[in-house]
Amino acid sequence: MGLFQLDSYVLLLSGNDCLTFIDGLSTNKVTGTCTTVFTDQNAKIIDMVDVITVGPNIALVGHAGFKENLVSHLISKILQQDVTIRDITLNNKVYLSTEECSLSEGVTVVETFRGWLVVASNATQLQPTMTLEEFNDYRVEHLIPHQGYEITSNNHPLACGLGHLVHEAKGCYIGQEILARMRSRGRQGKELVRLENPVENPTTSGKTHSLAIVRTSN
Amino acid sequence: MDCGTCDSGPAIVINAPQVVQVELTMTQKATEMLEDAFGDDRSHALLVGVLSGGCSGYMYDLQIVENTDIDCQELEINGFRVLVPNASSHLLNGIEIDYVDRLMGGGFKINNPNASSSCGCGESFS
């Protein structure tokens, strides 16, 4: 099993409206634990987050470098809804496991398309077993995008391998019109691909293959 | 995940926007449609609010209510009680409530001078 420590934030949302609030602002249908993407009006990514239900609350786990933009995006949208946001990043460490791992006290594990996301309290000692290079090789092998590499504010979700997180039938959210138009016309502009080295302008370099975002032929 | 301390941990401060004393207008057509909806009963009020969501980030929320727990300012427009939540007053000051009589896409419409853009259906703005 490979365990890599992610550079993540953890926000805890509480209040009666927290699920509908997140659902109304992101690309996936959010009814419970899932992964979704927040986009801006140009359908560019603010952050991809894992949503984890924690009792009556929900936790959002995203990339630390994108926290400030996401928090400012969220708080500007709270008007009369019952939503409170707490930053519990310092209480927890976040890992990605390449295989299913067992639960222990103080550890929350959810399966995601990237692997098993592990959120552990600081009291729980977990030892990472993967280096960044090994983690990147794992991602290249499985065509998994990551924040700061493929998932950036320059890309929309369809271009960086997150099309499966863009729900086809849900209602409006910020950026939805652009993404729906791209889909309906079959023109997403760019796509994430895995290519054998050497690769020109790779987004993630691996030992034998690399990830790159290239223009689609249509 | 450590959530045992969540309740005692600090919430991220949401700098509530300044409450604005809202002025709004209502077109003749919208007034007529509200007269149809309310009849002679003026005990109810029209709640004009804003929720997050929609293609542009904010969505209008129109409701006929008797009372509400939401912190609101109360206006009287063309003989109707109109409630505007203070939390969204900065987004609603100066709006015109209109009614568009169309088979498709008709109904109450908000003309909002604060909106920099709105989505095609007119229900969402930013």
Image (spheres, coloured by chain):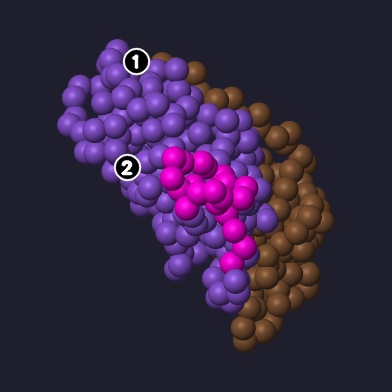
Q: Nearer the viewer, residue A143 or B42?
A: A143
Q: Residue at x 82, y 56 (%)?
A: B113
Q: Residue at x 48, y 36 (%)?
A: A62
Describe the element under mark 2 as helix, strand or loop.
strand
Q: Which mark is residue A115?
A: 2
Q: Which chain is purple?
A: A
Chain B: its colour in the image is: brown
Give how far across and how far down residue B92 sits, in percent. Answer: 73, 51
Tell me the distance, in whole angstroms, between the alpha carbons under discs 2 and 1: 21 Å
User: Magenta stretch: residue A199 in it?
Assistant: yes
| Tally of numbered tags | 2
Answer with left or right where residue B103 lies relative to residue A16. Answer: right
* Location of residue A174 by image quarter: bottom right
Residue sitting farthest toward the top: A123
Magenta span: A196-216
Describe the element under mark 1 as helix, strand or loop.
loop
Dot 2: chain letter = A
Answer with left or right where residue A148 lies relative to residue B22. Answer: left
Q: Residue at x 71, y 44 (%)?
A: B89
Answer with left or right where residue B64 lies relative to residue B56. Answer: left
